[in-house]
Image (cartoon, coloured by chain):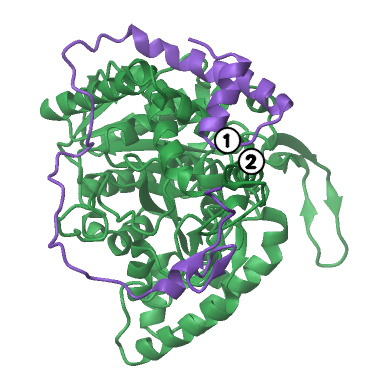
């Protein structure tokens, strides 16, 4: 029954409603796939088998009565950043050692209310700080995709005995998989890897600077970061509160639309949650984009960008043009300042948010001779290197005498970044098309990135502007590079116009086809 | 701007993170790399530009100042490393 794991959410939904399959069967199929794959991929850090079976049983009872919700019986994975009642919730940090919340995040509550089944908690960069999933306390996640080499194989002439075949010989090409392990991107690396490797039907994720879109691009999956305020942040471990947004990672555009519809809501418990009805995102899929104005920003053509990515971008432009869209060149002049401004704003907010981990109310405590020594030792032992680095930067830029030079300047630049987008949208552009990442997935323990934190930060160069301006952005797989690795294109929309993103991303998906890794794990 | 070893140690204390001499030295290099990277923001002319305070223009939601939740003392201390009768236990603060 392992092919049950290959159904998309929309396919599984139809089969569950039609009683062709049961929630119990599909849940078991995922649990056994996880059992086999997880020792290799490390995508899950906690598997909640008993809970999943209970929830599936409940779903089957509802489906039998024809009362199933929008996601009834669909097995999902949950990023470890979401509080799940009574279940491991540590943001993949040692500082939250043993933490099991007594409450459920709004986003996951919405999913369970719609009938989804929880398979477990997914690996991620510690406190969502990273672009490779290597900063997790639970070790790196492995990308199910591997590089491959295209070889020309000379086929010998073979003869087989009675009734057998005769091959005439000749040449054909074959891909040979490379053994090097690649990162799935981050911070939602567990979510992306699990979705790509068929270890869940879809997953929750979060995006502060690109943490949904970059791993989606690295794994051939679809990831959307909705507009700031669309999904409640209540019960999501805070990293940088003015940038954090939850969203789904899924196998296709329709599944992402289905998941976002359930995740999004207006929530009185989050004062930045928007009071707007959640549209039926799925309804726009398949609608023509004829006459839509697509902006191509010249600032996204950066030095050293691989030719494969430039070529893919041009292909994307051609696909949208063929579908009747009008392509216009645009300029977003402050683009290059988004990443440096982000590395002031995000660490500043993080240093404040992470002050709560002090060994008093929850998590790890390392004893000290007095309370200050207890704080200092608990935090020294509990936080990993990248998290400490960001807390230090944040503390420094907020400290007396430096606030104006760094934080205030960055917030002013942020206003200019947002204004760039506002000007373009005011000129009639409906959606902006860019590459999702400046490269394909890279190797685990890449030496270049390990020696210089800024090199790792550059992964988010195309995605971070969207968070700085609070806009929605989707990453959709659009092709493979010369080494057979997936690459994504990003679409950026007006505030709360996720519908246009789904509609346009679907056109790209139709033109590009779907991509899945060759199974080796 | 760049930081020296002394500044790193001071910031680490402000952030309540214990650092060894070796940690502080490594961090000095890393922080200076990041501060060097963000320096380019100074090229931007921000005269007359308001700093961003809210990414989406919205009025902060308010609610009636009434009790809507509570009586969860046991839940609140459930995850604490040390408690006594619904109090968090910490090392002595006042001498």
User: Quarter of the image holding residue A353?
Assistant: top left
Picture colour for chain B: purple
Q: Position of residue B18 (x, y in %)?
A: 64, 36
Foreground: A413 or A161?
A: A413
Chain A color in figure: green
Q: Residue at x 52, y 16 (%)?
A: A304
Residue shown at 37% from the left, 83% from the top: A18
In the displayed structure, B11 sits above or below A154; it is above
Seen in the picture, residue A313 relative to A250 is either above or below; the reply is above
The x, y position of residue A113, in whole percent, is: 33, 75
State the image coordinates of residue A392 (x, y, percent, origin top left).
Answer: 52, 29
Total labels drawn: 2
- For marks 1 and 2, the one nearer the N-term is 2
Q: Are marks 1 and 2 on the same chain?
A: yes
> Dots 1 and 2: beta carbons under 8 Å?
yes
Residue topped by disc 2: A380
Q: Which is nearer the eye, A10 or A37?
A: A37
Residue at the disc numbered 1: A388
Q: Quadrant of the N terminus of chain A?
A: bottom right
A411 lies left or right of A477: left
Tell me if mark 1 has few (under 14), some (14-19) or many (20+) residues whose alpha carbon lies within 10 angstroms of its own: many
């Amino acid at each position: 029954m392992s092919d049950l794991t290959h159904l998309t959410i929309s396919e599984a939904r139809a089969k569950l409603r039609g009683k062709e399959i049961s929630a119990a069967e599909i849940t078991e199929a995922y649990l056994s796939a996880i059992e086999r794959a997880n020792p290799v991929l490390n995508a899950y850090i906690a598997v909640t088998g008993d809970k999943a079976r209970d929830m599936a049983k409940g779903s089957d009872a509802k489906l039998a009565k024809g009362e199933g919700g929008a996601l009834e019986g669909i097995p999902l994975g949950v990023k470890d950043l979401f509080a799940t009642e009574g279940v491991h919730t540590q943001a993949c940090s040692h500082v939250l050692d043993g933490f099991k919340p007594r409450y459920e995040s709004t986003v996951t509550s919405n999913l369970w209310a719609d009938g989804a089944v929880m398979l477990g908690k997914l690996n991620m960069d510690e406190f969502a700080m990273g672009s490779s999933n290597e900063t997790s306390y639970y070790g790196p996640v492995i990308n199910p995709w591997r590089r491959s080499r295209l070889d020309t194989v000379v086929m010998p002439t073979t003869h087989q005995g009675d009734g057998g075949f005769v091959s005439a010989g000749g040449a054909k090409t074959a891909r040979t998989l490379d053994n090097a392990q690649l990162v799935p991107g981050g911070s939602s690396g567990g979510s992306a890897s699990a979705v790509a490797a068929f270890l869940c039907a879809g997953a929750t994720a979060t995006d502060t600077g690109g943490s949904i879109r970059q791993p989606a691009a690295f794994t051939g999956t679809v990831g959307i970061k909705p507009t700031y305020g669309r999904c409640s942040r209540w019960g999501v471990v805070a990293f940088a509160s003015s940038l954090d947004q939850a969203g789904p990672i899924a196998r296709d555009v329709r599944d992402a639309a289905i998941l976002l519809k359930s995740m999004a809501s207006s929530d009185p418990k989050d004062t930045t949650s928007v009071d707007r009805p959640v549209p039926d995102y799925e309804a726009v899929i398949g609608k023509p984009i004829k006459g839509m104005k697509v902006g191509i920003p010249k600032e996204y053509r950066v030095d050293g960008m691989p030719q494969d990515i430039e070529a893919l971008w041009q292909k994307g432009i051609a696909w949208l043009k063929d579908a009747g869209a009008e392509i216009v060149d645009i300029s977003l002049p402050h683009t290059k300042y988004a990443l440096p401004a982000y590395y002031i704003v995000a660490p500043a907010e993080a240093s404040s948010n992470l002050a709560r981990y002090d060994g008093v109310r929850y998590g790890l405590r390392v004893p000290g001779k007095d309370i200050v020594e207890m704080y200092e030792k608990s935090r020294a032992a509990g936080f990993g290197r990248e998290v400490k680095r960001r807390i230090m930067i944040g503390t420094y830029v907020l400290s007396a005498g430096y606030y104006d030079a760094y934080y205030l300047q960055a917030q002013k630049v942020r206003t200019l970044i947002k204004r760039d987008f506002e000007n373009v949208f005011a000129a009639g552009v409906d959606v902006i098309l860019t590459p999702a990442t400046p490269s394909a997935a890279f190797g685990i323990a890449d030496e270049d990135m390990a020696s210089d934190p800024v090199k790792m930060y550059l992964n988010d160069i195309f995605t971070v502007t969207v968070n700085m301006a609070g806009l929605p952005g989707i990453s959709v797989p659009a092709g493979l590079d010369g080494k057979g690795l997936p690459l994504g294109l990003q679409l950026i929309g007006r505030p709360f116009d996720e519908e246009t993103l789904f509609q346009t991303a679907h056109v790209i998906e139709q033109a590009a086809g779907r991509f899945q890794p060759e199974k080796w794990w | 701007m760049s930081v020296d070893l002394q500044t790193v140690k001071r910031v680490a204390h402000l952030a309540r993170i214990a650092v060894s001499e070796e940690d502080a030295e490594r961090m000095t290099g890393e922080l200076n790399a990041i501060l060097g990277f963000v320096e380019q923001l100074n090229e931007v002319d921000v005269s007359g530009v308001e700093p961003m305070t809210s990414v989406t223009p919205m009025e902060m939601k308010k609610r009636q100042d009434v009790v809507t939740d509570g009586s969860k003392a046991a839940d609140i201390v459930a995850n604490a490393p040390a408690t006594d009768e619904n109090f968090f236990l910490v090392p002595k603060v006042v001498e």
